Amino acid sequence: MGVNALIKKVLSEVGIKPERFGLQWASAAEAPRFVKLITEFTKEIQALGPVGQAEGLSPEEAKARIAKALALVSDRKLRMGLGNATKAIRKDALFTQEQITAVIEEKLGKTITAGLSESNAA
């Protein structure tokens, strides 16, 4: 769930609707649930339209912003920070999405902002 919160935060920061990313768990024994999850997510994405359209971006600008997001989540510093945030989440033993999102914001918010500022300067 920490990865989910991180990716949504990064997408939001680069101006891409975080609803474009979804991470759900379904076991092999949950075929009806899996079908439901995929069907609902597909409908949501279709409603948003092509990447950038809902955000008011040209295809080129959307591609550039996604490239920034990819570079950021590939950064060693951010990945190490996610590891530390995960430890904090486990230590607190509060596994609600709200708590996880708050920890990601607290532990990684500045790293995300700085990483995007660096990529803008480059």
Image (tube, rainbow, N blue to C red):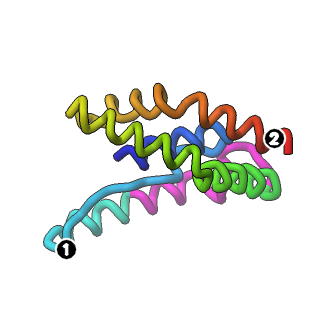
**Residue closer to the observer: 73 or 58:** 73
Q: Which residues are magenta?
A: 41-58
- Looking at the rendered image, the disc whose residue lies closer to the viewer, 2 or 1, is 2
Element type at mark 1: loop
The answer to which of marks 2 and 1 sits earlier in the sequence is: 1
Identify the residue position indicated by label 1 in the image.
28
Left or right of 96? Residue 23 is right
Identify the residue position indicated by label 2 in the image.
120
Let me know if residue 56 appears in the view.
yes
Question: As shown in the figure, which amino acid type bears the numbered disc 1?
Answer: Ala
Q: Position of residue 89 (x, y in %)?
A: 30, 35
Left or right of 56? Residue 12 is left
Q: Are marks 2 and 1 in contact (CB under 8 Å)?
A: no
Residue ID at (45%, 59%): 43
Rendered view: 106 above or below 18: above
Q: Position of residue 119 (x, y in %)?
A: 77, 44
